[in-house]
Amino acid sequence: MAPVIYPTTNFTATEQLCLERGEGIYVFDSDGRKYIEGLAGLWCTSLGYSNTEVMDAITEQLHKLPFSHTFGGKTHQPIQDLADKLAAMVPVEDAYIFFGNSGSDANDTHYKMLRYYFNAIGKSEKRKIITRERGYHGVTVAAGSLTSLPANLAHFDAPLEALSILRADSPHYYTARQGNETEAQFVERILQNLEDQILAEDPDTIAAMIVEPITGASGVIVPPEGYYEGLQALLRKYGILIWADEVICGFGRTGADFGCTTMGITPDLMTFAKQLSSAYFPISASVIPGWMYEAMVVQTNEVGVFGHGYTYSGHPAACAAALKTLEIYERDNLFAHAAEVGSYLQAQLREIFTDHPLVGEVRGKGLIAALELVSNKTTGASFEKGRAGATAQRLCQDNGLILRAVAGNAVALCPPLIITREEVDEMLTRLKTAIDASYAELKAGGHLAH
């Protein structure tokens, strides 16, 4: 084996699949076998594989200006054009944008800018950040501490207390409801819990709350109706900023431009990565409102610089890739396409899997969805150690479909935005075969609850 430390991998099970090329929604391994890439890589290759327009844009920029940093007053046209384009798209007042390389570093940047901003306006005590149970916001020190998934916290000794991280309830009704609680009662209870927590901590010490409009790695959780309406009213009441992590939802994934649009969120801060460039070149964006930027200007002048930045912030080839990707989204009406094909995907998933004995819940919006696998359909009992998720992921791959088990026993779907109805049918046929085989294998192994 190569001396590689593989990310988010069991070190006893590395190098199981070697991919060599991709085309459209398909990828091919080193043996020439063809797979549907049902998770768009890692929720990111929105335009599928081998889009020559994006590749040509990158190549042209590399021939023209292969690198330029943006420290100390230096700039270039692609970063200015991309910032202008994004500022015109986002629902953030007079937006300013910091460019990085990944969703993790973009969330770390926001964490630092919040500290910087509140120090600038003389409210240094306002430093706590609320995240949610089952949240995923990255793996750097600050972003990893905002993440709540056990595998991302175990053994890393995340400095939660030092970073002033607070955790609120997950808005997943299916797994977190109590007794015969209705969705409305569930929302009322967890929002009351949040208000109690805010008051106990003192609202004047809380800077922001970070949320994915619809979650990804925590299981594609779509909060119940009324949740975001109540959440926003609560946060506004106590002067707490709303920070939307759009790393997965942004740019068409939910069938709209942003997950905030789909879920009715009016954010103060927004985080982007992944589909910003269809993952063809690493780039992220941390968006803040103009009033926040203006408050930071004096601070930077006092110190001499805004002391934060990465070598590759606003890399010209990355900006070129993002500009071309955004152009294709707009020209080809891909957000509308994602909405139309996404509606078909959601309907077919529910028709095929709602009554399946291994599936407790089907959920999603647009072209992102998940099946919650359960050992008892009546009680909703789960499987220990993600057994069903791992089984389904393996059998999907055996059937030529690459998906990912997330949050234990949820199987996530997130195909490229370019997928057609016919390709959805092909994907779901393979998924059905794999889920049927998973049920048979788990039943034969005595893993189903009675």
Image (spheres, grey):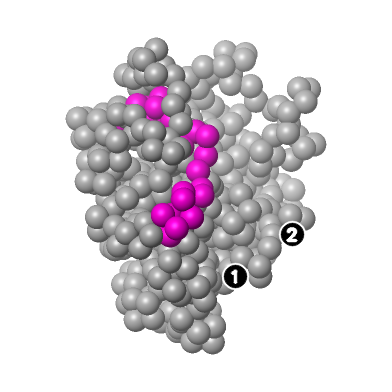
Residue 331, horizontal then vertical, whole percent: 19, 30
Callout 1: SS:
loop
Residue at 42 percent across and 35 percent down: it is: 70
Q: Give the extent of the magenta segment.
A: 299-323
Tell me if residue 134 comes above or below residue 285 in the rendering: below
Q: Which residue is mark 1?
A: 164
Residue 264, horizontal then vertical, whole percent: 28, 62
Residue 164, horizontal then vertical, whole percent: 59, 70
Q: Which residue is mark 2?
A: 157
Residues at marks 2 and 1 touching, judged by CB atoms closer than 8 Å: no
Q: Quadrant of residue 6?
A: top right
Magenta segment includes 120:
no
Q: Is residue 355 left or right of residue 250?
A: right
Magenta segment includes 316:
yes
Residue at 50 percent across and 64 percent down: it is: 115
Distance from Cα at disc 2 to Cα at disc 1: 14 Å
Quadrant where the image shows the C terminus = bottom right
First reached walking from the N terminus: tag 2 or tag 1: 2
Residue at 43 percent across and 54 percent down: it is: 300
Tell me if residue 163 comes above or below residue 156 in the rendering: below
Other residues around mark 1 within 10 Å, as few (<14) / some (14–19) / many (≥20) = some
Q: Number of callouts in the render?
A: 2
Residue at 24 percent across and 55 percent down: it is: 94
Note whether residue 330 is visible: yes
Quadrant where the image shows the N terminus = top right
Observer-nearest of 44 and 450: 44
